[in-house]
Image (cartoon, grey):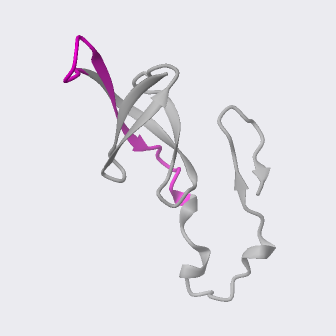
Amino acid sequence: MIEIEVQNETHQSQHRMRFAAVPRIGEGIRLREPDGIWASYDVLDVWYQKAEYGDIWMPFLHVRLTPGEGEGLSDPCDGEDSAHDLAAEPRFASLAGEAEPFKI
């Protein structure tokens, strides 16, 4: 496992995470949002910095939420129709590599 520092442009946050391989620029990765929902992020930049100890180079990622990914996260009750029934409308989620969304 490779420990990588991920700098999230969307939420202005930094986290250390473990990956099996270093993602390349332009690839998409799935990260958990602060509210616990998984979302797709685009890798904008990858760079390496020498660690404070030994002759080790640490990878860093700069990511941003994939365009269109956050559009479905708004609350449908925020509009004028406050009597909207959430149970009547199915909600969907998808996993990377899965063609069909599944109901949650």
Comparing 40 with 72, the one in front is 40
Q: Is residue 81 left or right of residue 70?
A: right
Q: Which segment is the magenta one? A: 49-71
Coordinates of residue 31 in the picture (x, y in percent): 51, 43
Coordinates of residue 63 in the picture (x, y in percent): 38, 38
In the displayed orientation, state which residue is furthest to the top: 55
In the displayed orientation, state which residue is furthest to the front: 53
Look at the picture and state if 4 lies above or below 36: above
Look at the picture and state if 32 lies above or below 29: below
Q: Quadrant of residue 64?
A: top left
Q: Residue at 50% of width from left, 32% of height from top?
A: 28
Coordinates of residue 9 in the picture (x, y in percent): 32, 46
Q: Is residue 67 magenta?
A: yes
Q: Is residue 94 magenta?
A: no
State which quarter of the image contains the C terminus: bottom right
Comparing 16 with 103, the one in front is 16
Coordinates of residue 93 in the picture (x, y in percent): 69, 51
Q: Residue at 39% of width from left, 24% of height from top?
A: 25
